Amino acid sequence: MAELPARLVALTQARIGLTRTGQSLGTGSALAFELAHARARDAVHAAFDTDALHAAFKVIEVHSQAADRITYLQRPDLGRLLAIDDVHRLAPTGADTAIIVADGLSATAVARHAVPLLSALLPRLGGRLAPVVAAHQARVALGDAIGVALAVELVVILIGERPGLSAPDSLGAYITWNPRAGRLDSERNCVSNIRPPHGLGYAAAADRIAWLVHEARARRLTGVALKDESDSAPGLGGTRLQID
Amino acid sequence: MAYHTDLAGTRHVFSDLKALLAAATPLRSGDVLAGIAATSAESRIAARYALADLPLATFLHDLVIPYENDEVSRLIIDSHDAAAFAPLAALTVGAFRDWLLAADGAAIAAAAPGLTPEMVAGVSKLMRNQDLVVVAAKLRVVTSFRNSLGLAGRLSSRLQPNHPTDDPAGIAASILDGLLLGSGDACIGINPASDSLASTATLLAMLDDIRLRLAIPTQSCVLAHVTTSIALIGRGAPVDLVFQSVAGTQGANHGFGIDLALLAEAAAAAQSLGRGSIGDNAFYVETGQGSALSAGAHHGVDQQTLECRAYGVARRFQPLLVNSVVGFIGPEYLYDGKQILRAALEDHCCGKLLGLPMGVDICYTNHAEADQDDIDSIMTLAGVAGVNFIMGVPGSDDIMLNYQSTSFHDVLYLRETLGLRPAPEFEDWLLASGITDSAGHIAATPLALALPALLDG
């Protein structure tokens, strides 16, 4: 039976070199998969705890129009709309850039990575920053509504990505120039898989995001017309355009 | 115009053709989200009665999205083959279903250029899962680049070695694992985490190096945006297959950053390289129900009809591979294993009816109501239906895209259980390399093969 050498298995988090019996998975590998799936299912339903964000930054909390997790999962349209009662919490401050932290599909990712990533990112951004917005039951496009309410010209939304089996805590960053209702996915840039130590690290991710923000300001656009030509580690633009 | 049917004294009215098609569609969350699903179980069947009586030719003049407003509608109408349609021109949709179930594969294939995506979508709504299997199983769509895909008795796989930071050594390790388990004949295809030119070029060079050093009769692909592939072809990168996600409306394609002219440019660029040794199918297309709704460009048309229109786009470009990524989009479009199964069989059958080399990425996300048992059921039925290829993902766990698909082991299971074999050229290579034995089983340790040396280079 073919067994992959341990030094090769160590090169990736992917499930390679699994035990095989006949043409099928061995019991140990099958159970390990089931445990990982159970954990990912739990991450989807975890609550968004904003205490650590409040301790580190000035934060405004808002909710989408999806009232609970079950509604959120079945009604992405509601996850893109700002709750009516929360619109008044957001007003133009003279800032030109908004930073949003959103639970998305993994509050676990936000809990682990949002504060250290923001600590690396904020000093790199320049511009006039609005207070950090924490958004509950949020999809990526909720950032457009928040950007409109704050009257900024650019939004960066850090959002929990779909939990994977081996990555229940992956954070994504979407950058949108001139946020407004109806922005297309192709009009955003993305830095995904922010998840040290296995995914993109905080400094590298912050470099990427900052590069895109500076380019967006200079060229007054984001999206497919703004190719990532920064030379740091990869992490941009998933090729399957299902973004949240 | 409006359509109606009377059932036991109750008149069920459907305001136009797209409303009729939507109401006739088996229940799925995406159509509910769009507000176009049938309002009751009985109204769904009433819609099917009305649809069954509809002349097939109706779809040529009553368009679900107006000709003037959408270049996909224009493509469908302008490329319609009236001569191929002639034998079916007098049929209703219901009679077309009966014809499909009775006809042989050659007759159906001959009619394919005369079928529009909406005709195929319409008839599929009158078909049970069993019908979708039996019709698809009659059809063989064979394509080639460096091997022959889609032949009878064959099942191929795309080896999908994704890595969250595009690390070449990590990707190479997954490729090695997949090759040693007999996967990779449809292609070795990486979804890159980065769409950057430099990173994509690095991966393309690595894939080409592995293929050449091991003399593998297969093709490679980095599934970057089509503009990235065009730019890299211009810089001389070794691009075998050009990839693009496509959808069934002009607006949804705009959301993908493409239009038909750009796809034509990409197809021409790929073919200009002439890298295929036995064939020139050089396009790799991915689709999936719900993409147009997700992009806010569905025009009130149900997601399965729009999926068929995406196939209408794909067939314009003679692809090597068309892959319906059926469970990736999430529970707001396909809620659970039952809905994913139905969509997988619809997509495979409808794509084959339109003459496409269909594979299916049988998959689910962690926020959907599905698990490995659903994957097992769907892949078994897709195998019986004659699917050209499925995915081979290490341990079913894609660590970059964060979803679960079929594994290298699943491909082995399906080949073993259904008596299917890899593409012939690849099968020969597996045997000559010592990866499989003469019975086609994975051999005892084939590491005598110098594969690991690749990782030292």
Image (cartoon, coloured by chain):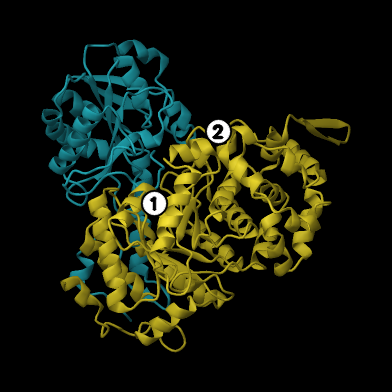
Q: Residue at x 66, y 58 (%)?
A: B132
Are marks 2 and 1 in one subunit? yes
**Image disc number at residue B151:** none
Q: Residue at x 45, y 58 (%)?
A: B284
The chain painted cyan is A
Label 1 secondary element: strand
Residue at far bottom of view: B438
**Image disc number at residue B403:** 1
Residue carrying label 2: B33
In the rendered view, would you say A79 is above or below B323?
A: above
Question: Crowdedness of circle 1 by 10 Å Cα count: few (<14), some, many (20+)?
Answer: many
Q: In the image, residue B13 lies at what x, y percent?
A: 78, 30
Q: In the image, residue B97 lies at what x, y percent?
A: 76, 55
Q: Nearer the viewer, residue A220 or B371?
A: A220
Q: Nearer the viewer, residue A224 or B159?
A: A224
| Chain assignment, label 1 | B
Q: Residue at x 30, y 83 (%)?
A: B445
Determine the colour of chain B: yellow
Q: Nearer the viewer, residue A55 or B320?
A: B320
In the rendered view of the protein, which quadrant contains the N terminus of chain A?
A: bottom left
In the rendered view, would you say B272 is above or below B314?
A: below
Q: Is residue B428 left or right of residue B179?
A: right
Label 2 secondary element: helix
Pointer 2 or 1: first along the chain: 2
